[in-house]
Image (cartoon, rainbow, N blue to C red):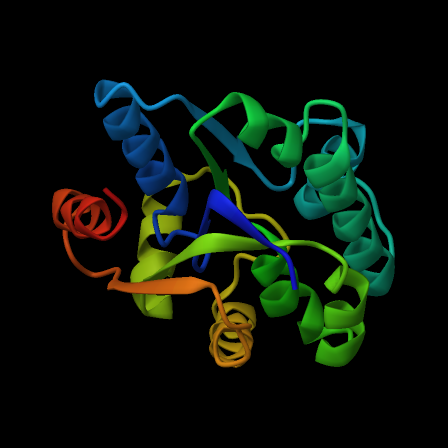
Amino acid sequence: MEILENFIVFEGLDGAGTTTQARLLSEAMQKRSLSTHLTCEPTDHEIGKLIRRVLSGETKITRKALAMLYAADRDDHIFGKDGIKAQLVDNDYVISDRYLFSSEAYQSIDTPFEEVAELNKRFPMPQYLIYIDTPVDHCMKRIESSRNSKDIFEHTQFQLSVYENYNTALSNLCDGIKLIRIDGTLSIEEIHMQILAEIL
């Protein structure tokens, strides 16, 4: 399995704080004169935009089709003209808010875990996987207090299943990935400082 050196991925439930922590790490690296490309999944490319319409409920497709869309978006994200592999040539680090582990956690609710893993087996792995481990009730409170609407995955029972799937995905990591598991109930600053201590 290919490991992409200096590729960092943030994972966690909706509301865990992955977007905030990815941004803070990128800013901290730039202050240290490290060039950093910050990205996310779904991407803002055409396939990613379609995925976001599905998540909002605007577009209806089967859950297996959604898993395939995520894999297609990821293929472009990694191997496309301005994708992650290209960005790693031009930058010291690439940081992604979510990657294939999200697919294993979310899409395997309605599609067998093995099928989702098969769709994603060709993709390279990150050197660092930062999992912000946050209880479902904490995440749901954050979502309810900060968002006007929820996407199709942002409901308690679904998130409980996602949490279990994350544990399955994280227990099957290949050698060479450094897993950094952090208590998501800590303050934003405490989480950030723990991440810095592990990465820099």
Tally of numbered discs:
0
- Which of these two is toward me, 30 or 43? 30
Which image quadrant for residue 65? Answer: bottom right
**At which x and y percent is residue 95?**
46, 38
Question: Toward which corner of the image does residue 184 lie, by quadrant?
Answer: bottom left
The location of residue 109, given as percent across then percent down, is 67, 74
Residue 98 visible, this angle: no
| The N terminus - image quarter | bottom right
Identify which residue, 34 or 193, lies in the foreground: 34
Q: Residue at x 69, y 72 (%)?
A: 108
Quadrant in which the C terminus is drawn: top left
Question: Is 53 located above or below residue 110 in the figure?
Answer: above
22 is higher (above) or lower (below) than 44: below
Who's the residue at 38% across and 65% down the image?
179
Q: Which residue is located at x 54 percent, y 71 percent?
A: 162
**In-image side of 183 versus 102 (left or right):** left
Instruction: Indicate the quadrant where residue 137 lies.
Output: bottom left
Residue at x-position 24% and y-position 28%: 28
Q: Position of residue 11 (x, y in %)?
A: 45, 55
Q: Position of residue 142 (x, y in %)?
A: 32, 50
- Lateral position of residue 147 relative to residue 25, left or right: right
Is residue 188 shown to the viewer in this render?
yes
Drawn side of residue 168 relative to residue 128, left or right:
right
